[in-house]
Amino acid sequence: MYTPHTQADIRAMLDAIGVGSLDELLAVPDAVALKAELDIVPALPEYQIARRFEHFAAKNAGVDFVSFLGAGAYRHYAPPAIATLAMRGEFLTAYTPYQAEVSQGYLQAIYEWQSYICLLTGMDMANASVYDGATALAEGTIMAINANGRKKVLVSRAVDPNYRAVLKTYCDGLDIAIDEIAIAADGTTDLAALKAAVASKEYAAVALQTPNFFGNIDTLDADALAAVRESSTVPIAVVSEAISLAALATPASWGAEIVVGEAQSFGVALAYGGPYVGFIAATKEHMRRIPGRLVGKSVDNDGRTAYVLTLQAREQHIRRERATSNICTNQAHCALIATIYLALMGKTGLRDVAALNLARSRELATSVSAIAGVDLKFTAPFFNEIVVDVHQNADDVLAKLRERKILGGVALGRFYPELSTCILMNATELTSTGDIEALATALSEVVHVHANV
Amino acid sequence: MSTQTSNDRPNAAPPLIFELGQEGRANRYVEEGRPLDQFLPTSLLRDELPLPDNSELEVVRHFTKLSQRTFGIDLGFYPLGSCTMKYNPRVNDAMASKREFAQLHPYTPDEHAQGALQVMYELERSLSSLFGMAAFSLNPSAGAHAELAALLIAKKYFKDRGESHRDKVIVPDTAHGTNPASAAMCGFKVISLPSDERGRVSVEEIKKVVGPDTAVCMMTNPNTLGLFEDHIHEIAAAVHEVGGLMYYDGANANAIMGNVRPGDMGFDLMHLNLHKTFTIPHGGGGAGHGPVGVAAHLVDYLPTPYVRATPAKADATASNGRPLAPSDAMTYELDFDRPKSIGPMRSFWSNFAHAVRALAYIYANGADGLKKVSQLAVLNANYVRVKVADFLETPYPEICRHEFVASAQDLKKATGVKALDIAKALLDHGMMAPTMYFPLIVPECLMIEPTETESKETLDHFVEVLREIVETARKEPETIMAAPVKTVVGRVDETRAARQPDLKWEPASA
């Protein structure tokens, strides 16, 4: 499929090359020749491909449930104009814009993405994107390691467990040790423990997530920042719910030098986990250490404004084993989607979305905590997620909710054994009062039945 | 060739999105929100949000204009070597954007995401069979990411065997730059191996560098010169003899698919760029999708999660009463409990939307169709090679695979016109330039990969345009050195961009 060759074309081309057949053209030594029968489905005409995928789609019943799932991937409204624009073939079928003269549009869009990320985070510069939030944390941590040469890093235990797992995968490769900071009773990072740890001056970086994995706002206070600076540790802010950037004090304002995160919330489909889009932003001191592509504004040979990939001397195709990272492909198309989302929403729309997330999550918190036997686990100020303690096995409660076509949240026991009775619940602008009432009704039935057993 | 002046250029760059719009010109996508300080103390809130408010029409025009200043496969021939810029079938996108896939949350419990898991399983099994591997993990996000995963697997495998002293990774000088960069990210030392006069890795050279400290030999076959490494089984034997692992860089898999398998060549580890070989749109440089595959002895080390299938009831039938396809009679789960695994490479399970696209492409072709894809990719490359050899030097004049290299070195000596100038001149003819100056061992290199989706007429036209450019270069080199003149901008000042970095828009007040 998708090959335009006629038999006459093939004959004429083989003749031009001077070989007798396609088999002759692709001949290989017998030692490596294909002998096995390939286990691949026979070719299907296009209408049957569609039927096959209809069949798969019908087996994803979870998509129609009332959902309170968040935990690093968020349901937000995405205006249809995003897809109309992003799916234009010029954007969709372009390669990395190496040839600037025929890539000005994409380069400008990425320059706008970099600008948006800087405006949202308060940083001096941002790259053209990385794979996702977790890899952004890993790459951002490597920047800090390259900055001060230390071989240990410090991470709050309230950072998304998936991000910490990916950081470990990367650090195992580089023989970097990771130490974790405990969580305080209110559901934020234990800053006293943080201050004690950085005082050793052994850590390249310290990473905090805000809002953290539990939804709580979690930043360095002035004392902790002073201790971090005194120890020459690089403070890294992690942001996995990017909508929060429209409302909360910027990471720059509380001292972060590197901000890493996930921009899926900006119009990128949930798509069962990907593709999403990570970002890395930093103060200008870290400019030469940032990984991945950067787009700069310059001029052409007649002085016209022109955009171009720049500072490529950091990159793998120039420096090979001395590069700051091996990253080549990034997430340009997802970054484009996020840029279009930000342009459409604007300041007013983003503020509204943030306010609605704050409102609906508070409505959710009020509603579930009114149920006997259900409590909010933490007391810290939160953005759009809450930890709900059901005082019994959370997996069992969630299974009962699924019988009522409700995805009640993420059971935390798989990541935090001490929170095995807790559920992480998310509400966004798409969560209705009806959804919250349905959950509260179901939850009170389920918890009550269990409690009586 | 007509000489044009830069006055012919179309419009100047559109204003930045930040220079458009008016405060309060909001689109009503969601309800109005209450003031933020009703929810949180002001000490936790930001002071201002300096973003523009634009009408939807302004935004639509802005990005439509930007798209018109961007060149993609949909607009013309894209012979970018090593990037496999083939047609991206639209049915793939239609399948990936189905609501039941696009809106499925990654934490949806397995029992309610069986369709998504089955897509991942069928893709994983198909790739394993096609490339002769025991298993793939769909976890890594792109080629370089999967390369890193593969080297982390090797590192952990040797550690478990008490062979952590193996710290050398052998990389041919024709290798993609990601190979040595990935090796460095795992703490390996890189040994660069020179190619022989045939443009290949020689068995003698390999035998000289392998030893008890060899961890991995990273190769791509065909290599980046487009040549098949015909002694690959002897090279693999030499590496295996000293206890090392063979890694296959799958960037060039479009040349071999369905015809010969890395597993049969002796490779233990490999990656694929599904965005190259399996028609996922490149999207201006991602998102890609880069599964990592391994031979049987390395399966336990794959990144998590792995999609595991167990047979459902043996007598299961579909709702219409017909027997189920084998994969329909399974139940699927994400397996995270793999103690020897290197761990996850990314936040969530895979670039799932791209797994849908790749599987749709496999369905459209079947085994025979995929074999034909590679054959015709090789046919197209050789056809262009023999035609281009009429007027440009081709340093390796023999049957190539899916791509070949030409050199403008002679032309440069005679006229001063470089590979870069030829590339820029092609842009004026509505075509993308080939990959330039790579691989590094060929001076003034142009690396040309036509792909199988291009017709003979397109290839003939490309050859004629290239011939005309070379002929013009010999008569009036300054014309070619001034190219491009029909694009929206001329050559961009890269030195200024690097010396005075301007990486973002600043508010006027700043």
Image (cartoon, rainbow, N blue to C red):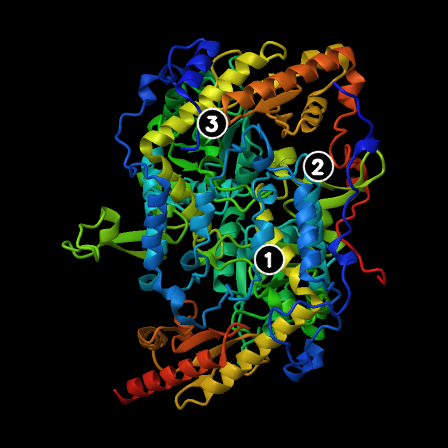
Q: Nearer the viewer, residue A107 or B93?
A: B93
Horizontal arrangement in the rendering, residue A202 relative to residue A171 (left or right)? right
**Element type where label 3 sits in the image:** loop
Q: Residue sitting at 71 percent across and 49 percent down?
A: A111
Which quadrant holds residue B240? top left
Q: For the residue carrying disc 2, how many other residues have a C-alpha within 10 Å: few (<14), some (14-19), or many (20+)?
A: many
Residue of label 2: A100
Q: Nearer the viewer, residue A361 or A45?
A: A45
Q: Residue furthest left?
A: B315
Distance between the alpha carbons at the discs numbered 2 and 1: 26 Å
Q: For the residue carrying disc 1, how many other residues have a C-alpha within 10 Å: few (<14), some (14-19), or many (20+)?
A: some
What amino acid is at disc 1? Ala
Q: Nearer the viewer, residue A152 or B347?
A: B347
Nearer to us of marks 3 and 1 is: 1
What amino acid is at disc 2? Ala
Q: For the residue carrying disc 3, how many other residues have a C-alpha within 10 Å: few (<14), some (14-19), or many (20+)?
A: many
Q: Are marks 3 and 1 in contact (CB under 8 Å)?
A: no
Q: Is residue A354 above or below residue A100?
A: below
Distance between the alpha carbons at the discs numbered 3 and 2: 26 Å
Residue B411 makes an appearance in the image: yes
Distance between the alpha carbons at the discs numbered 3 and 1: 33 Å
Chain identifier of the residue bearing label 3 in the image: B
Residue of label 3: B452
Which quadrant holds residue B78? top right
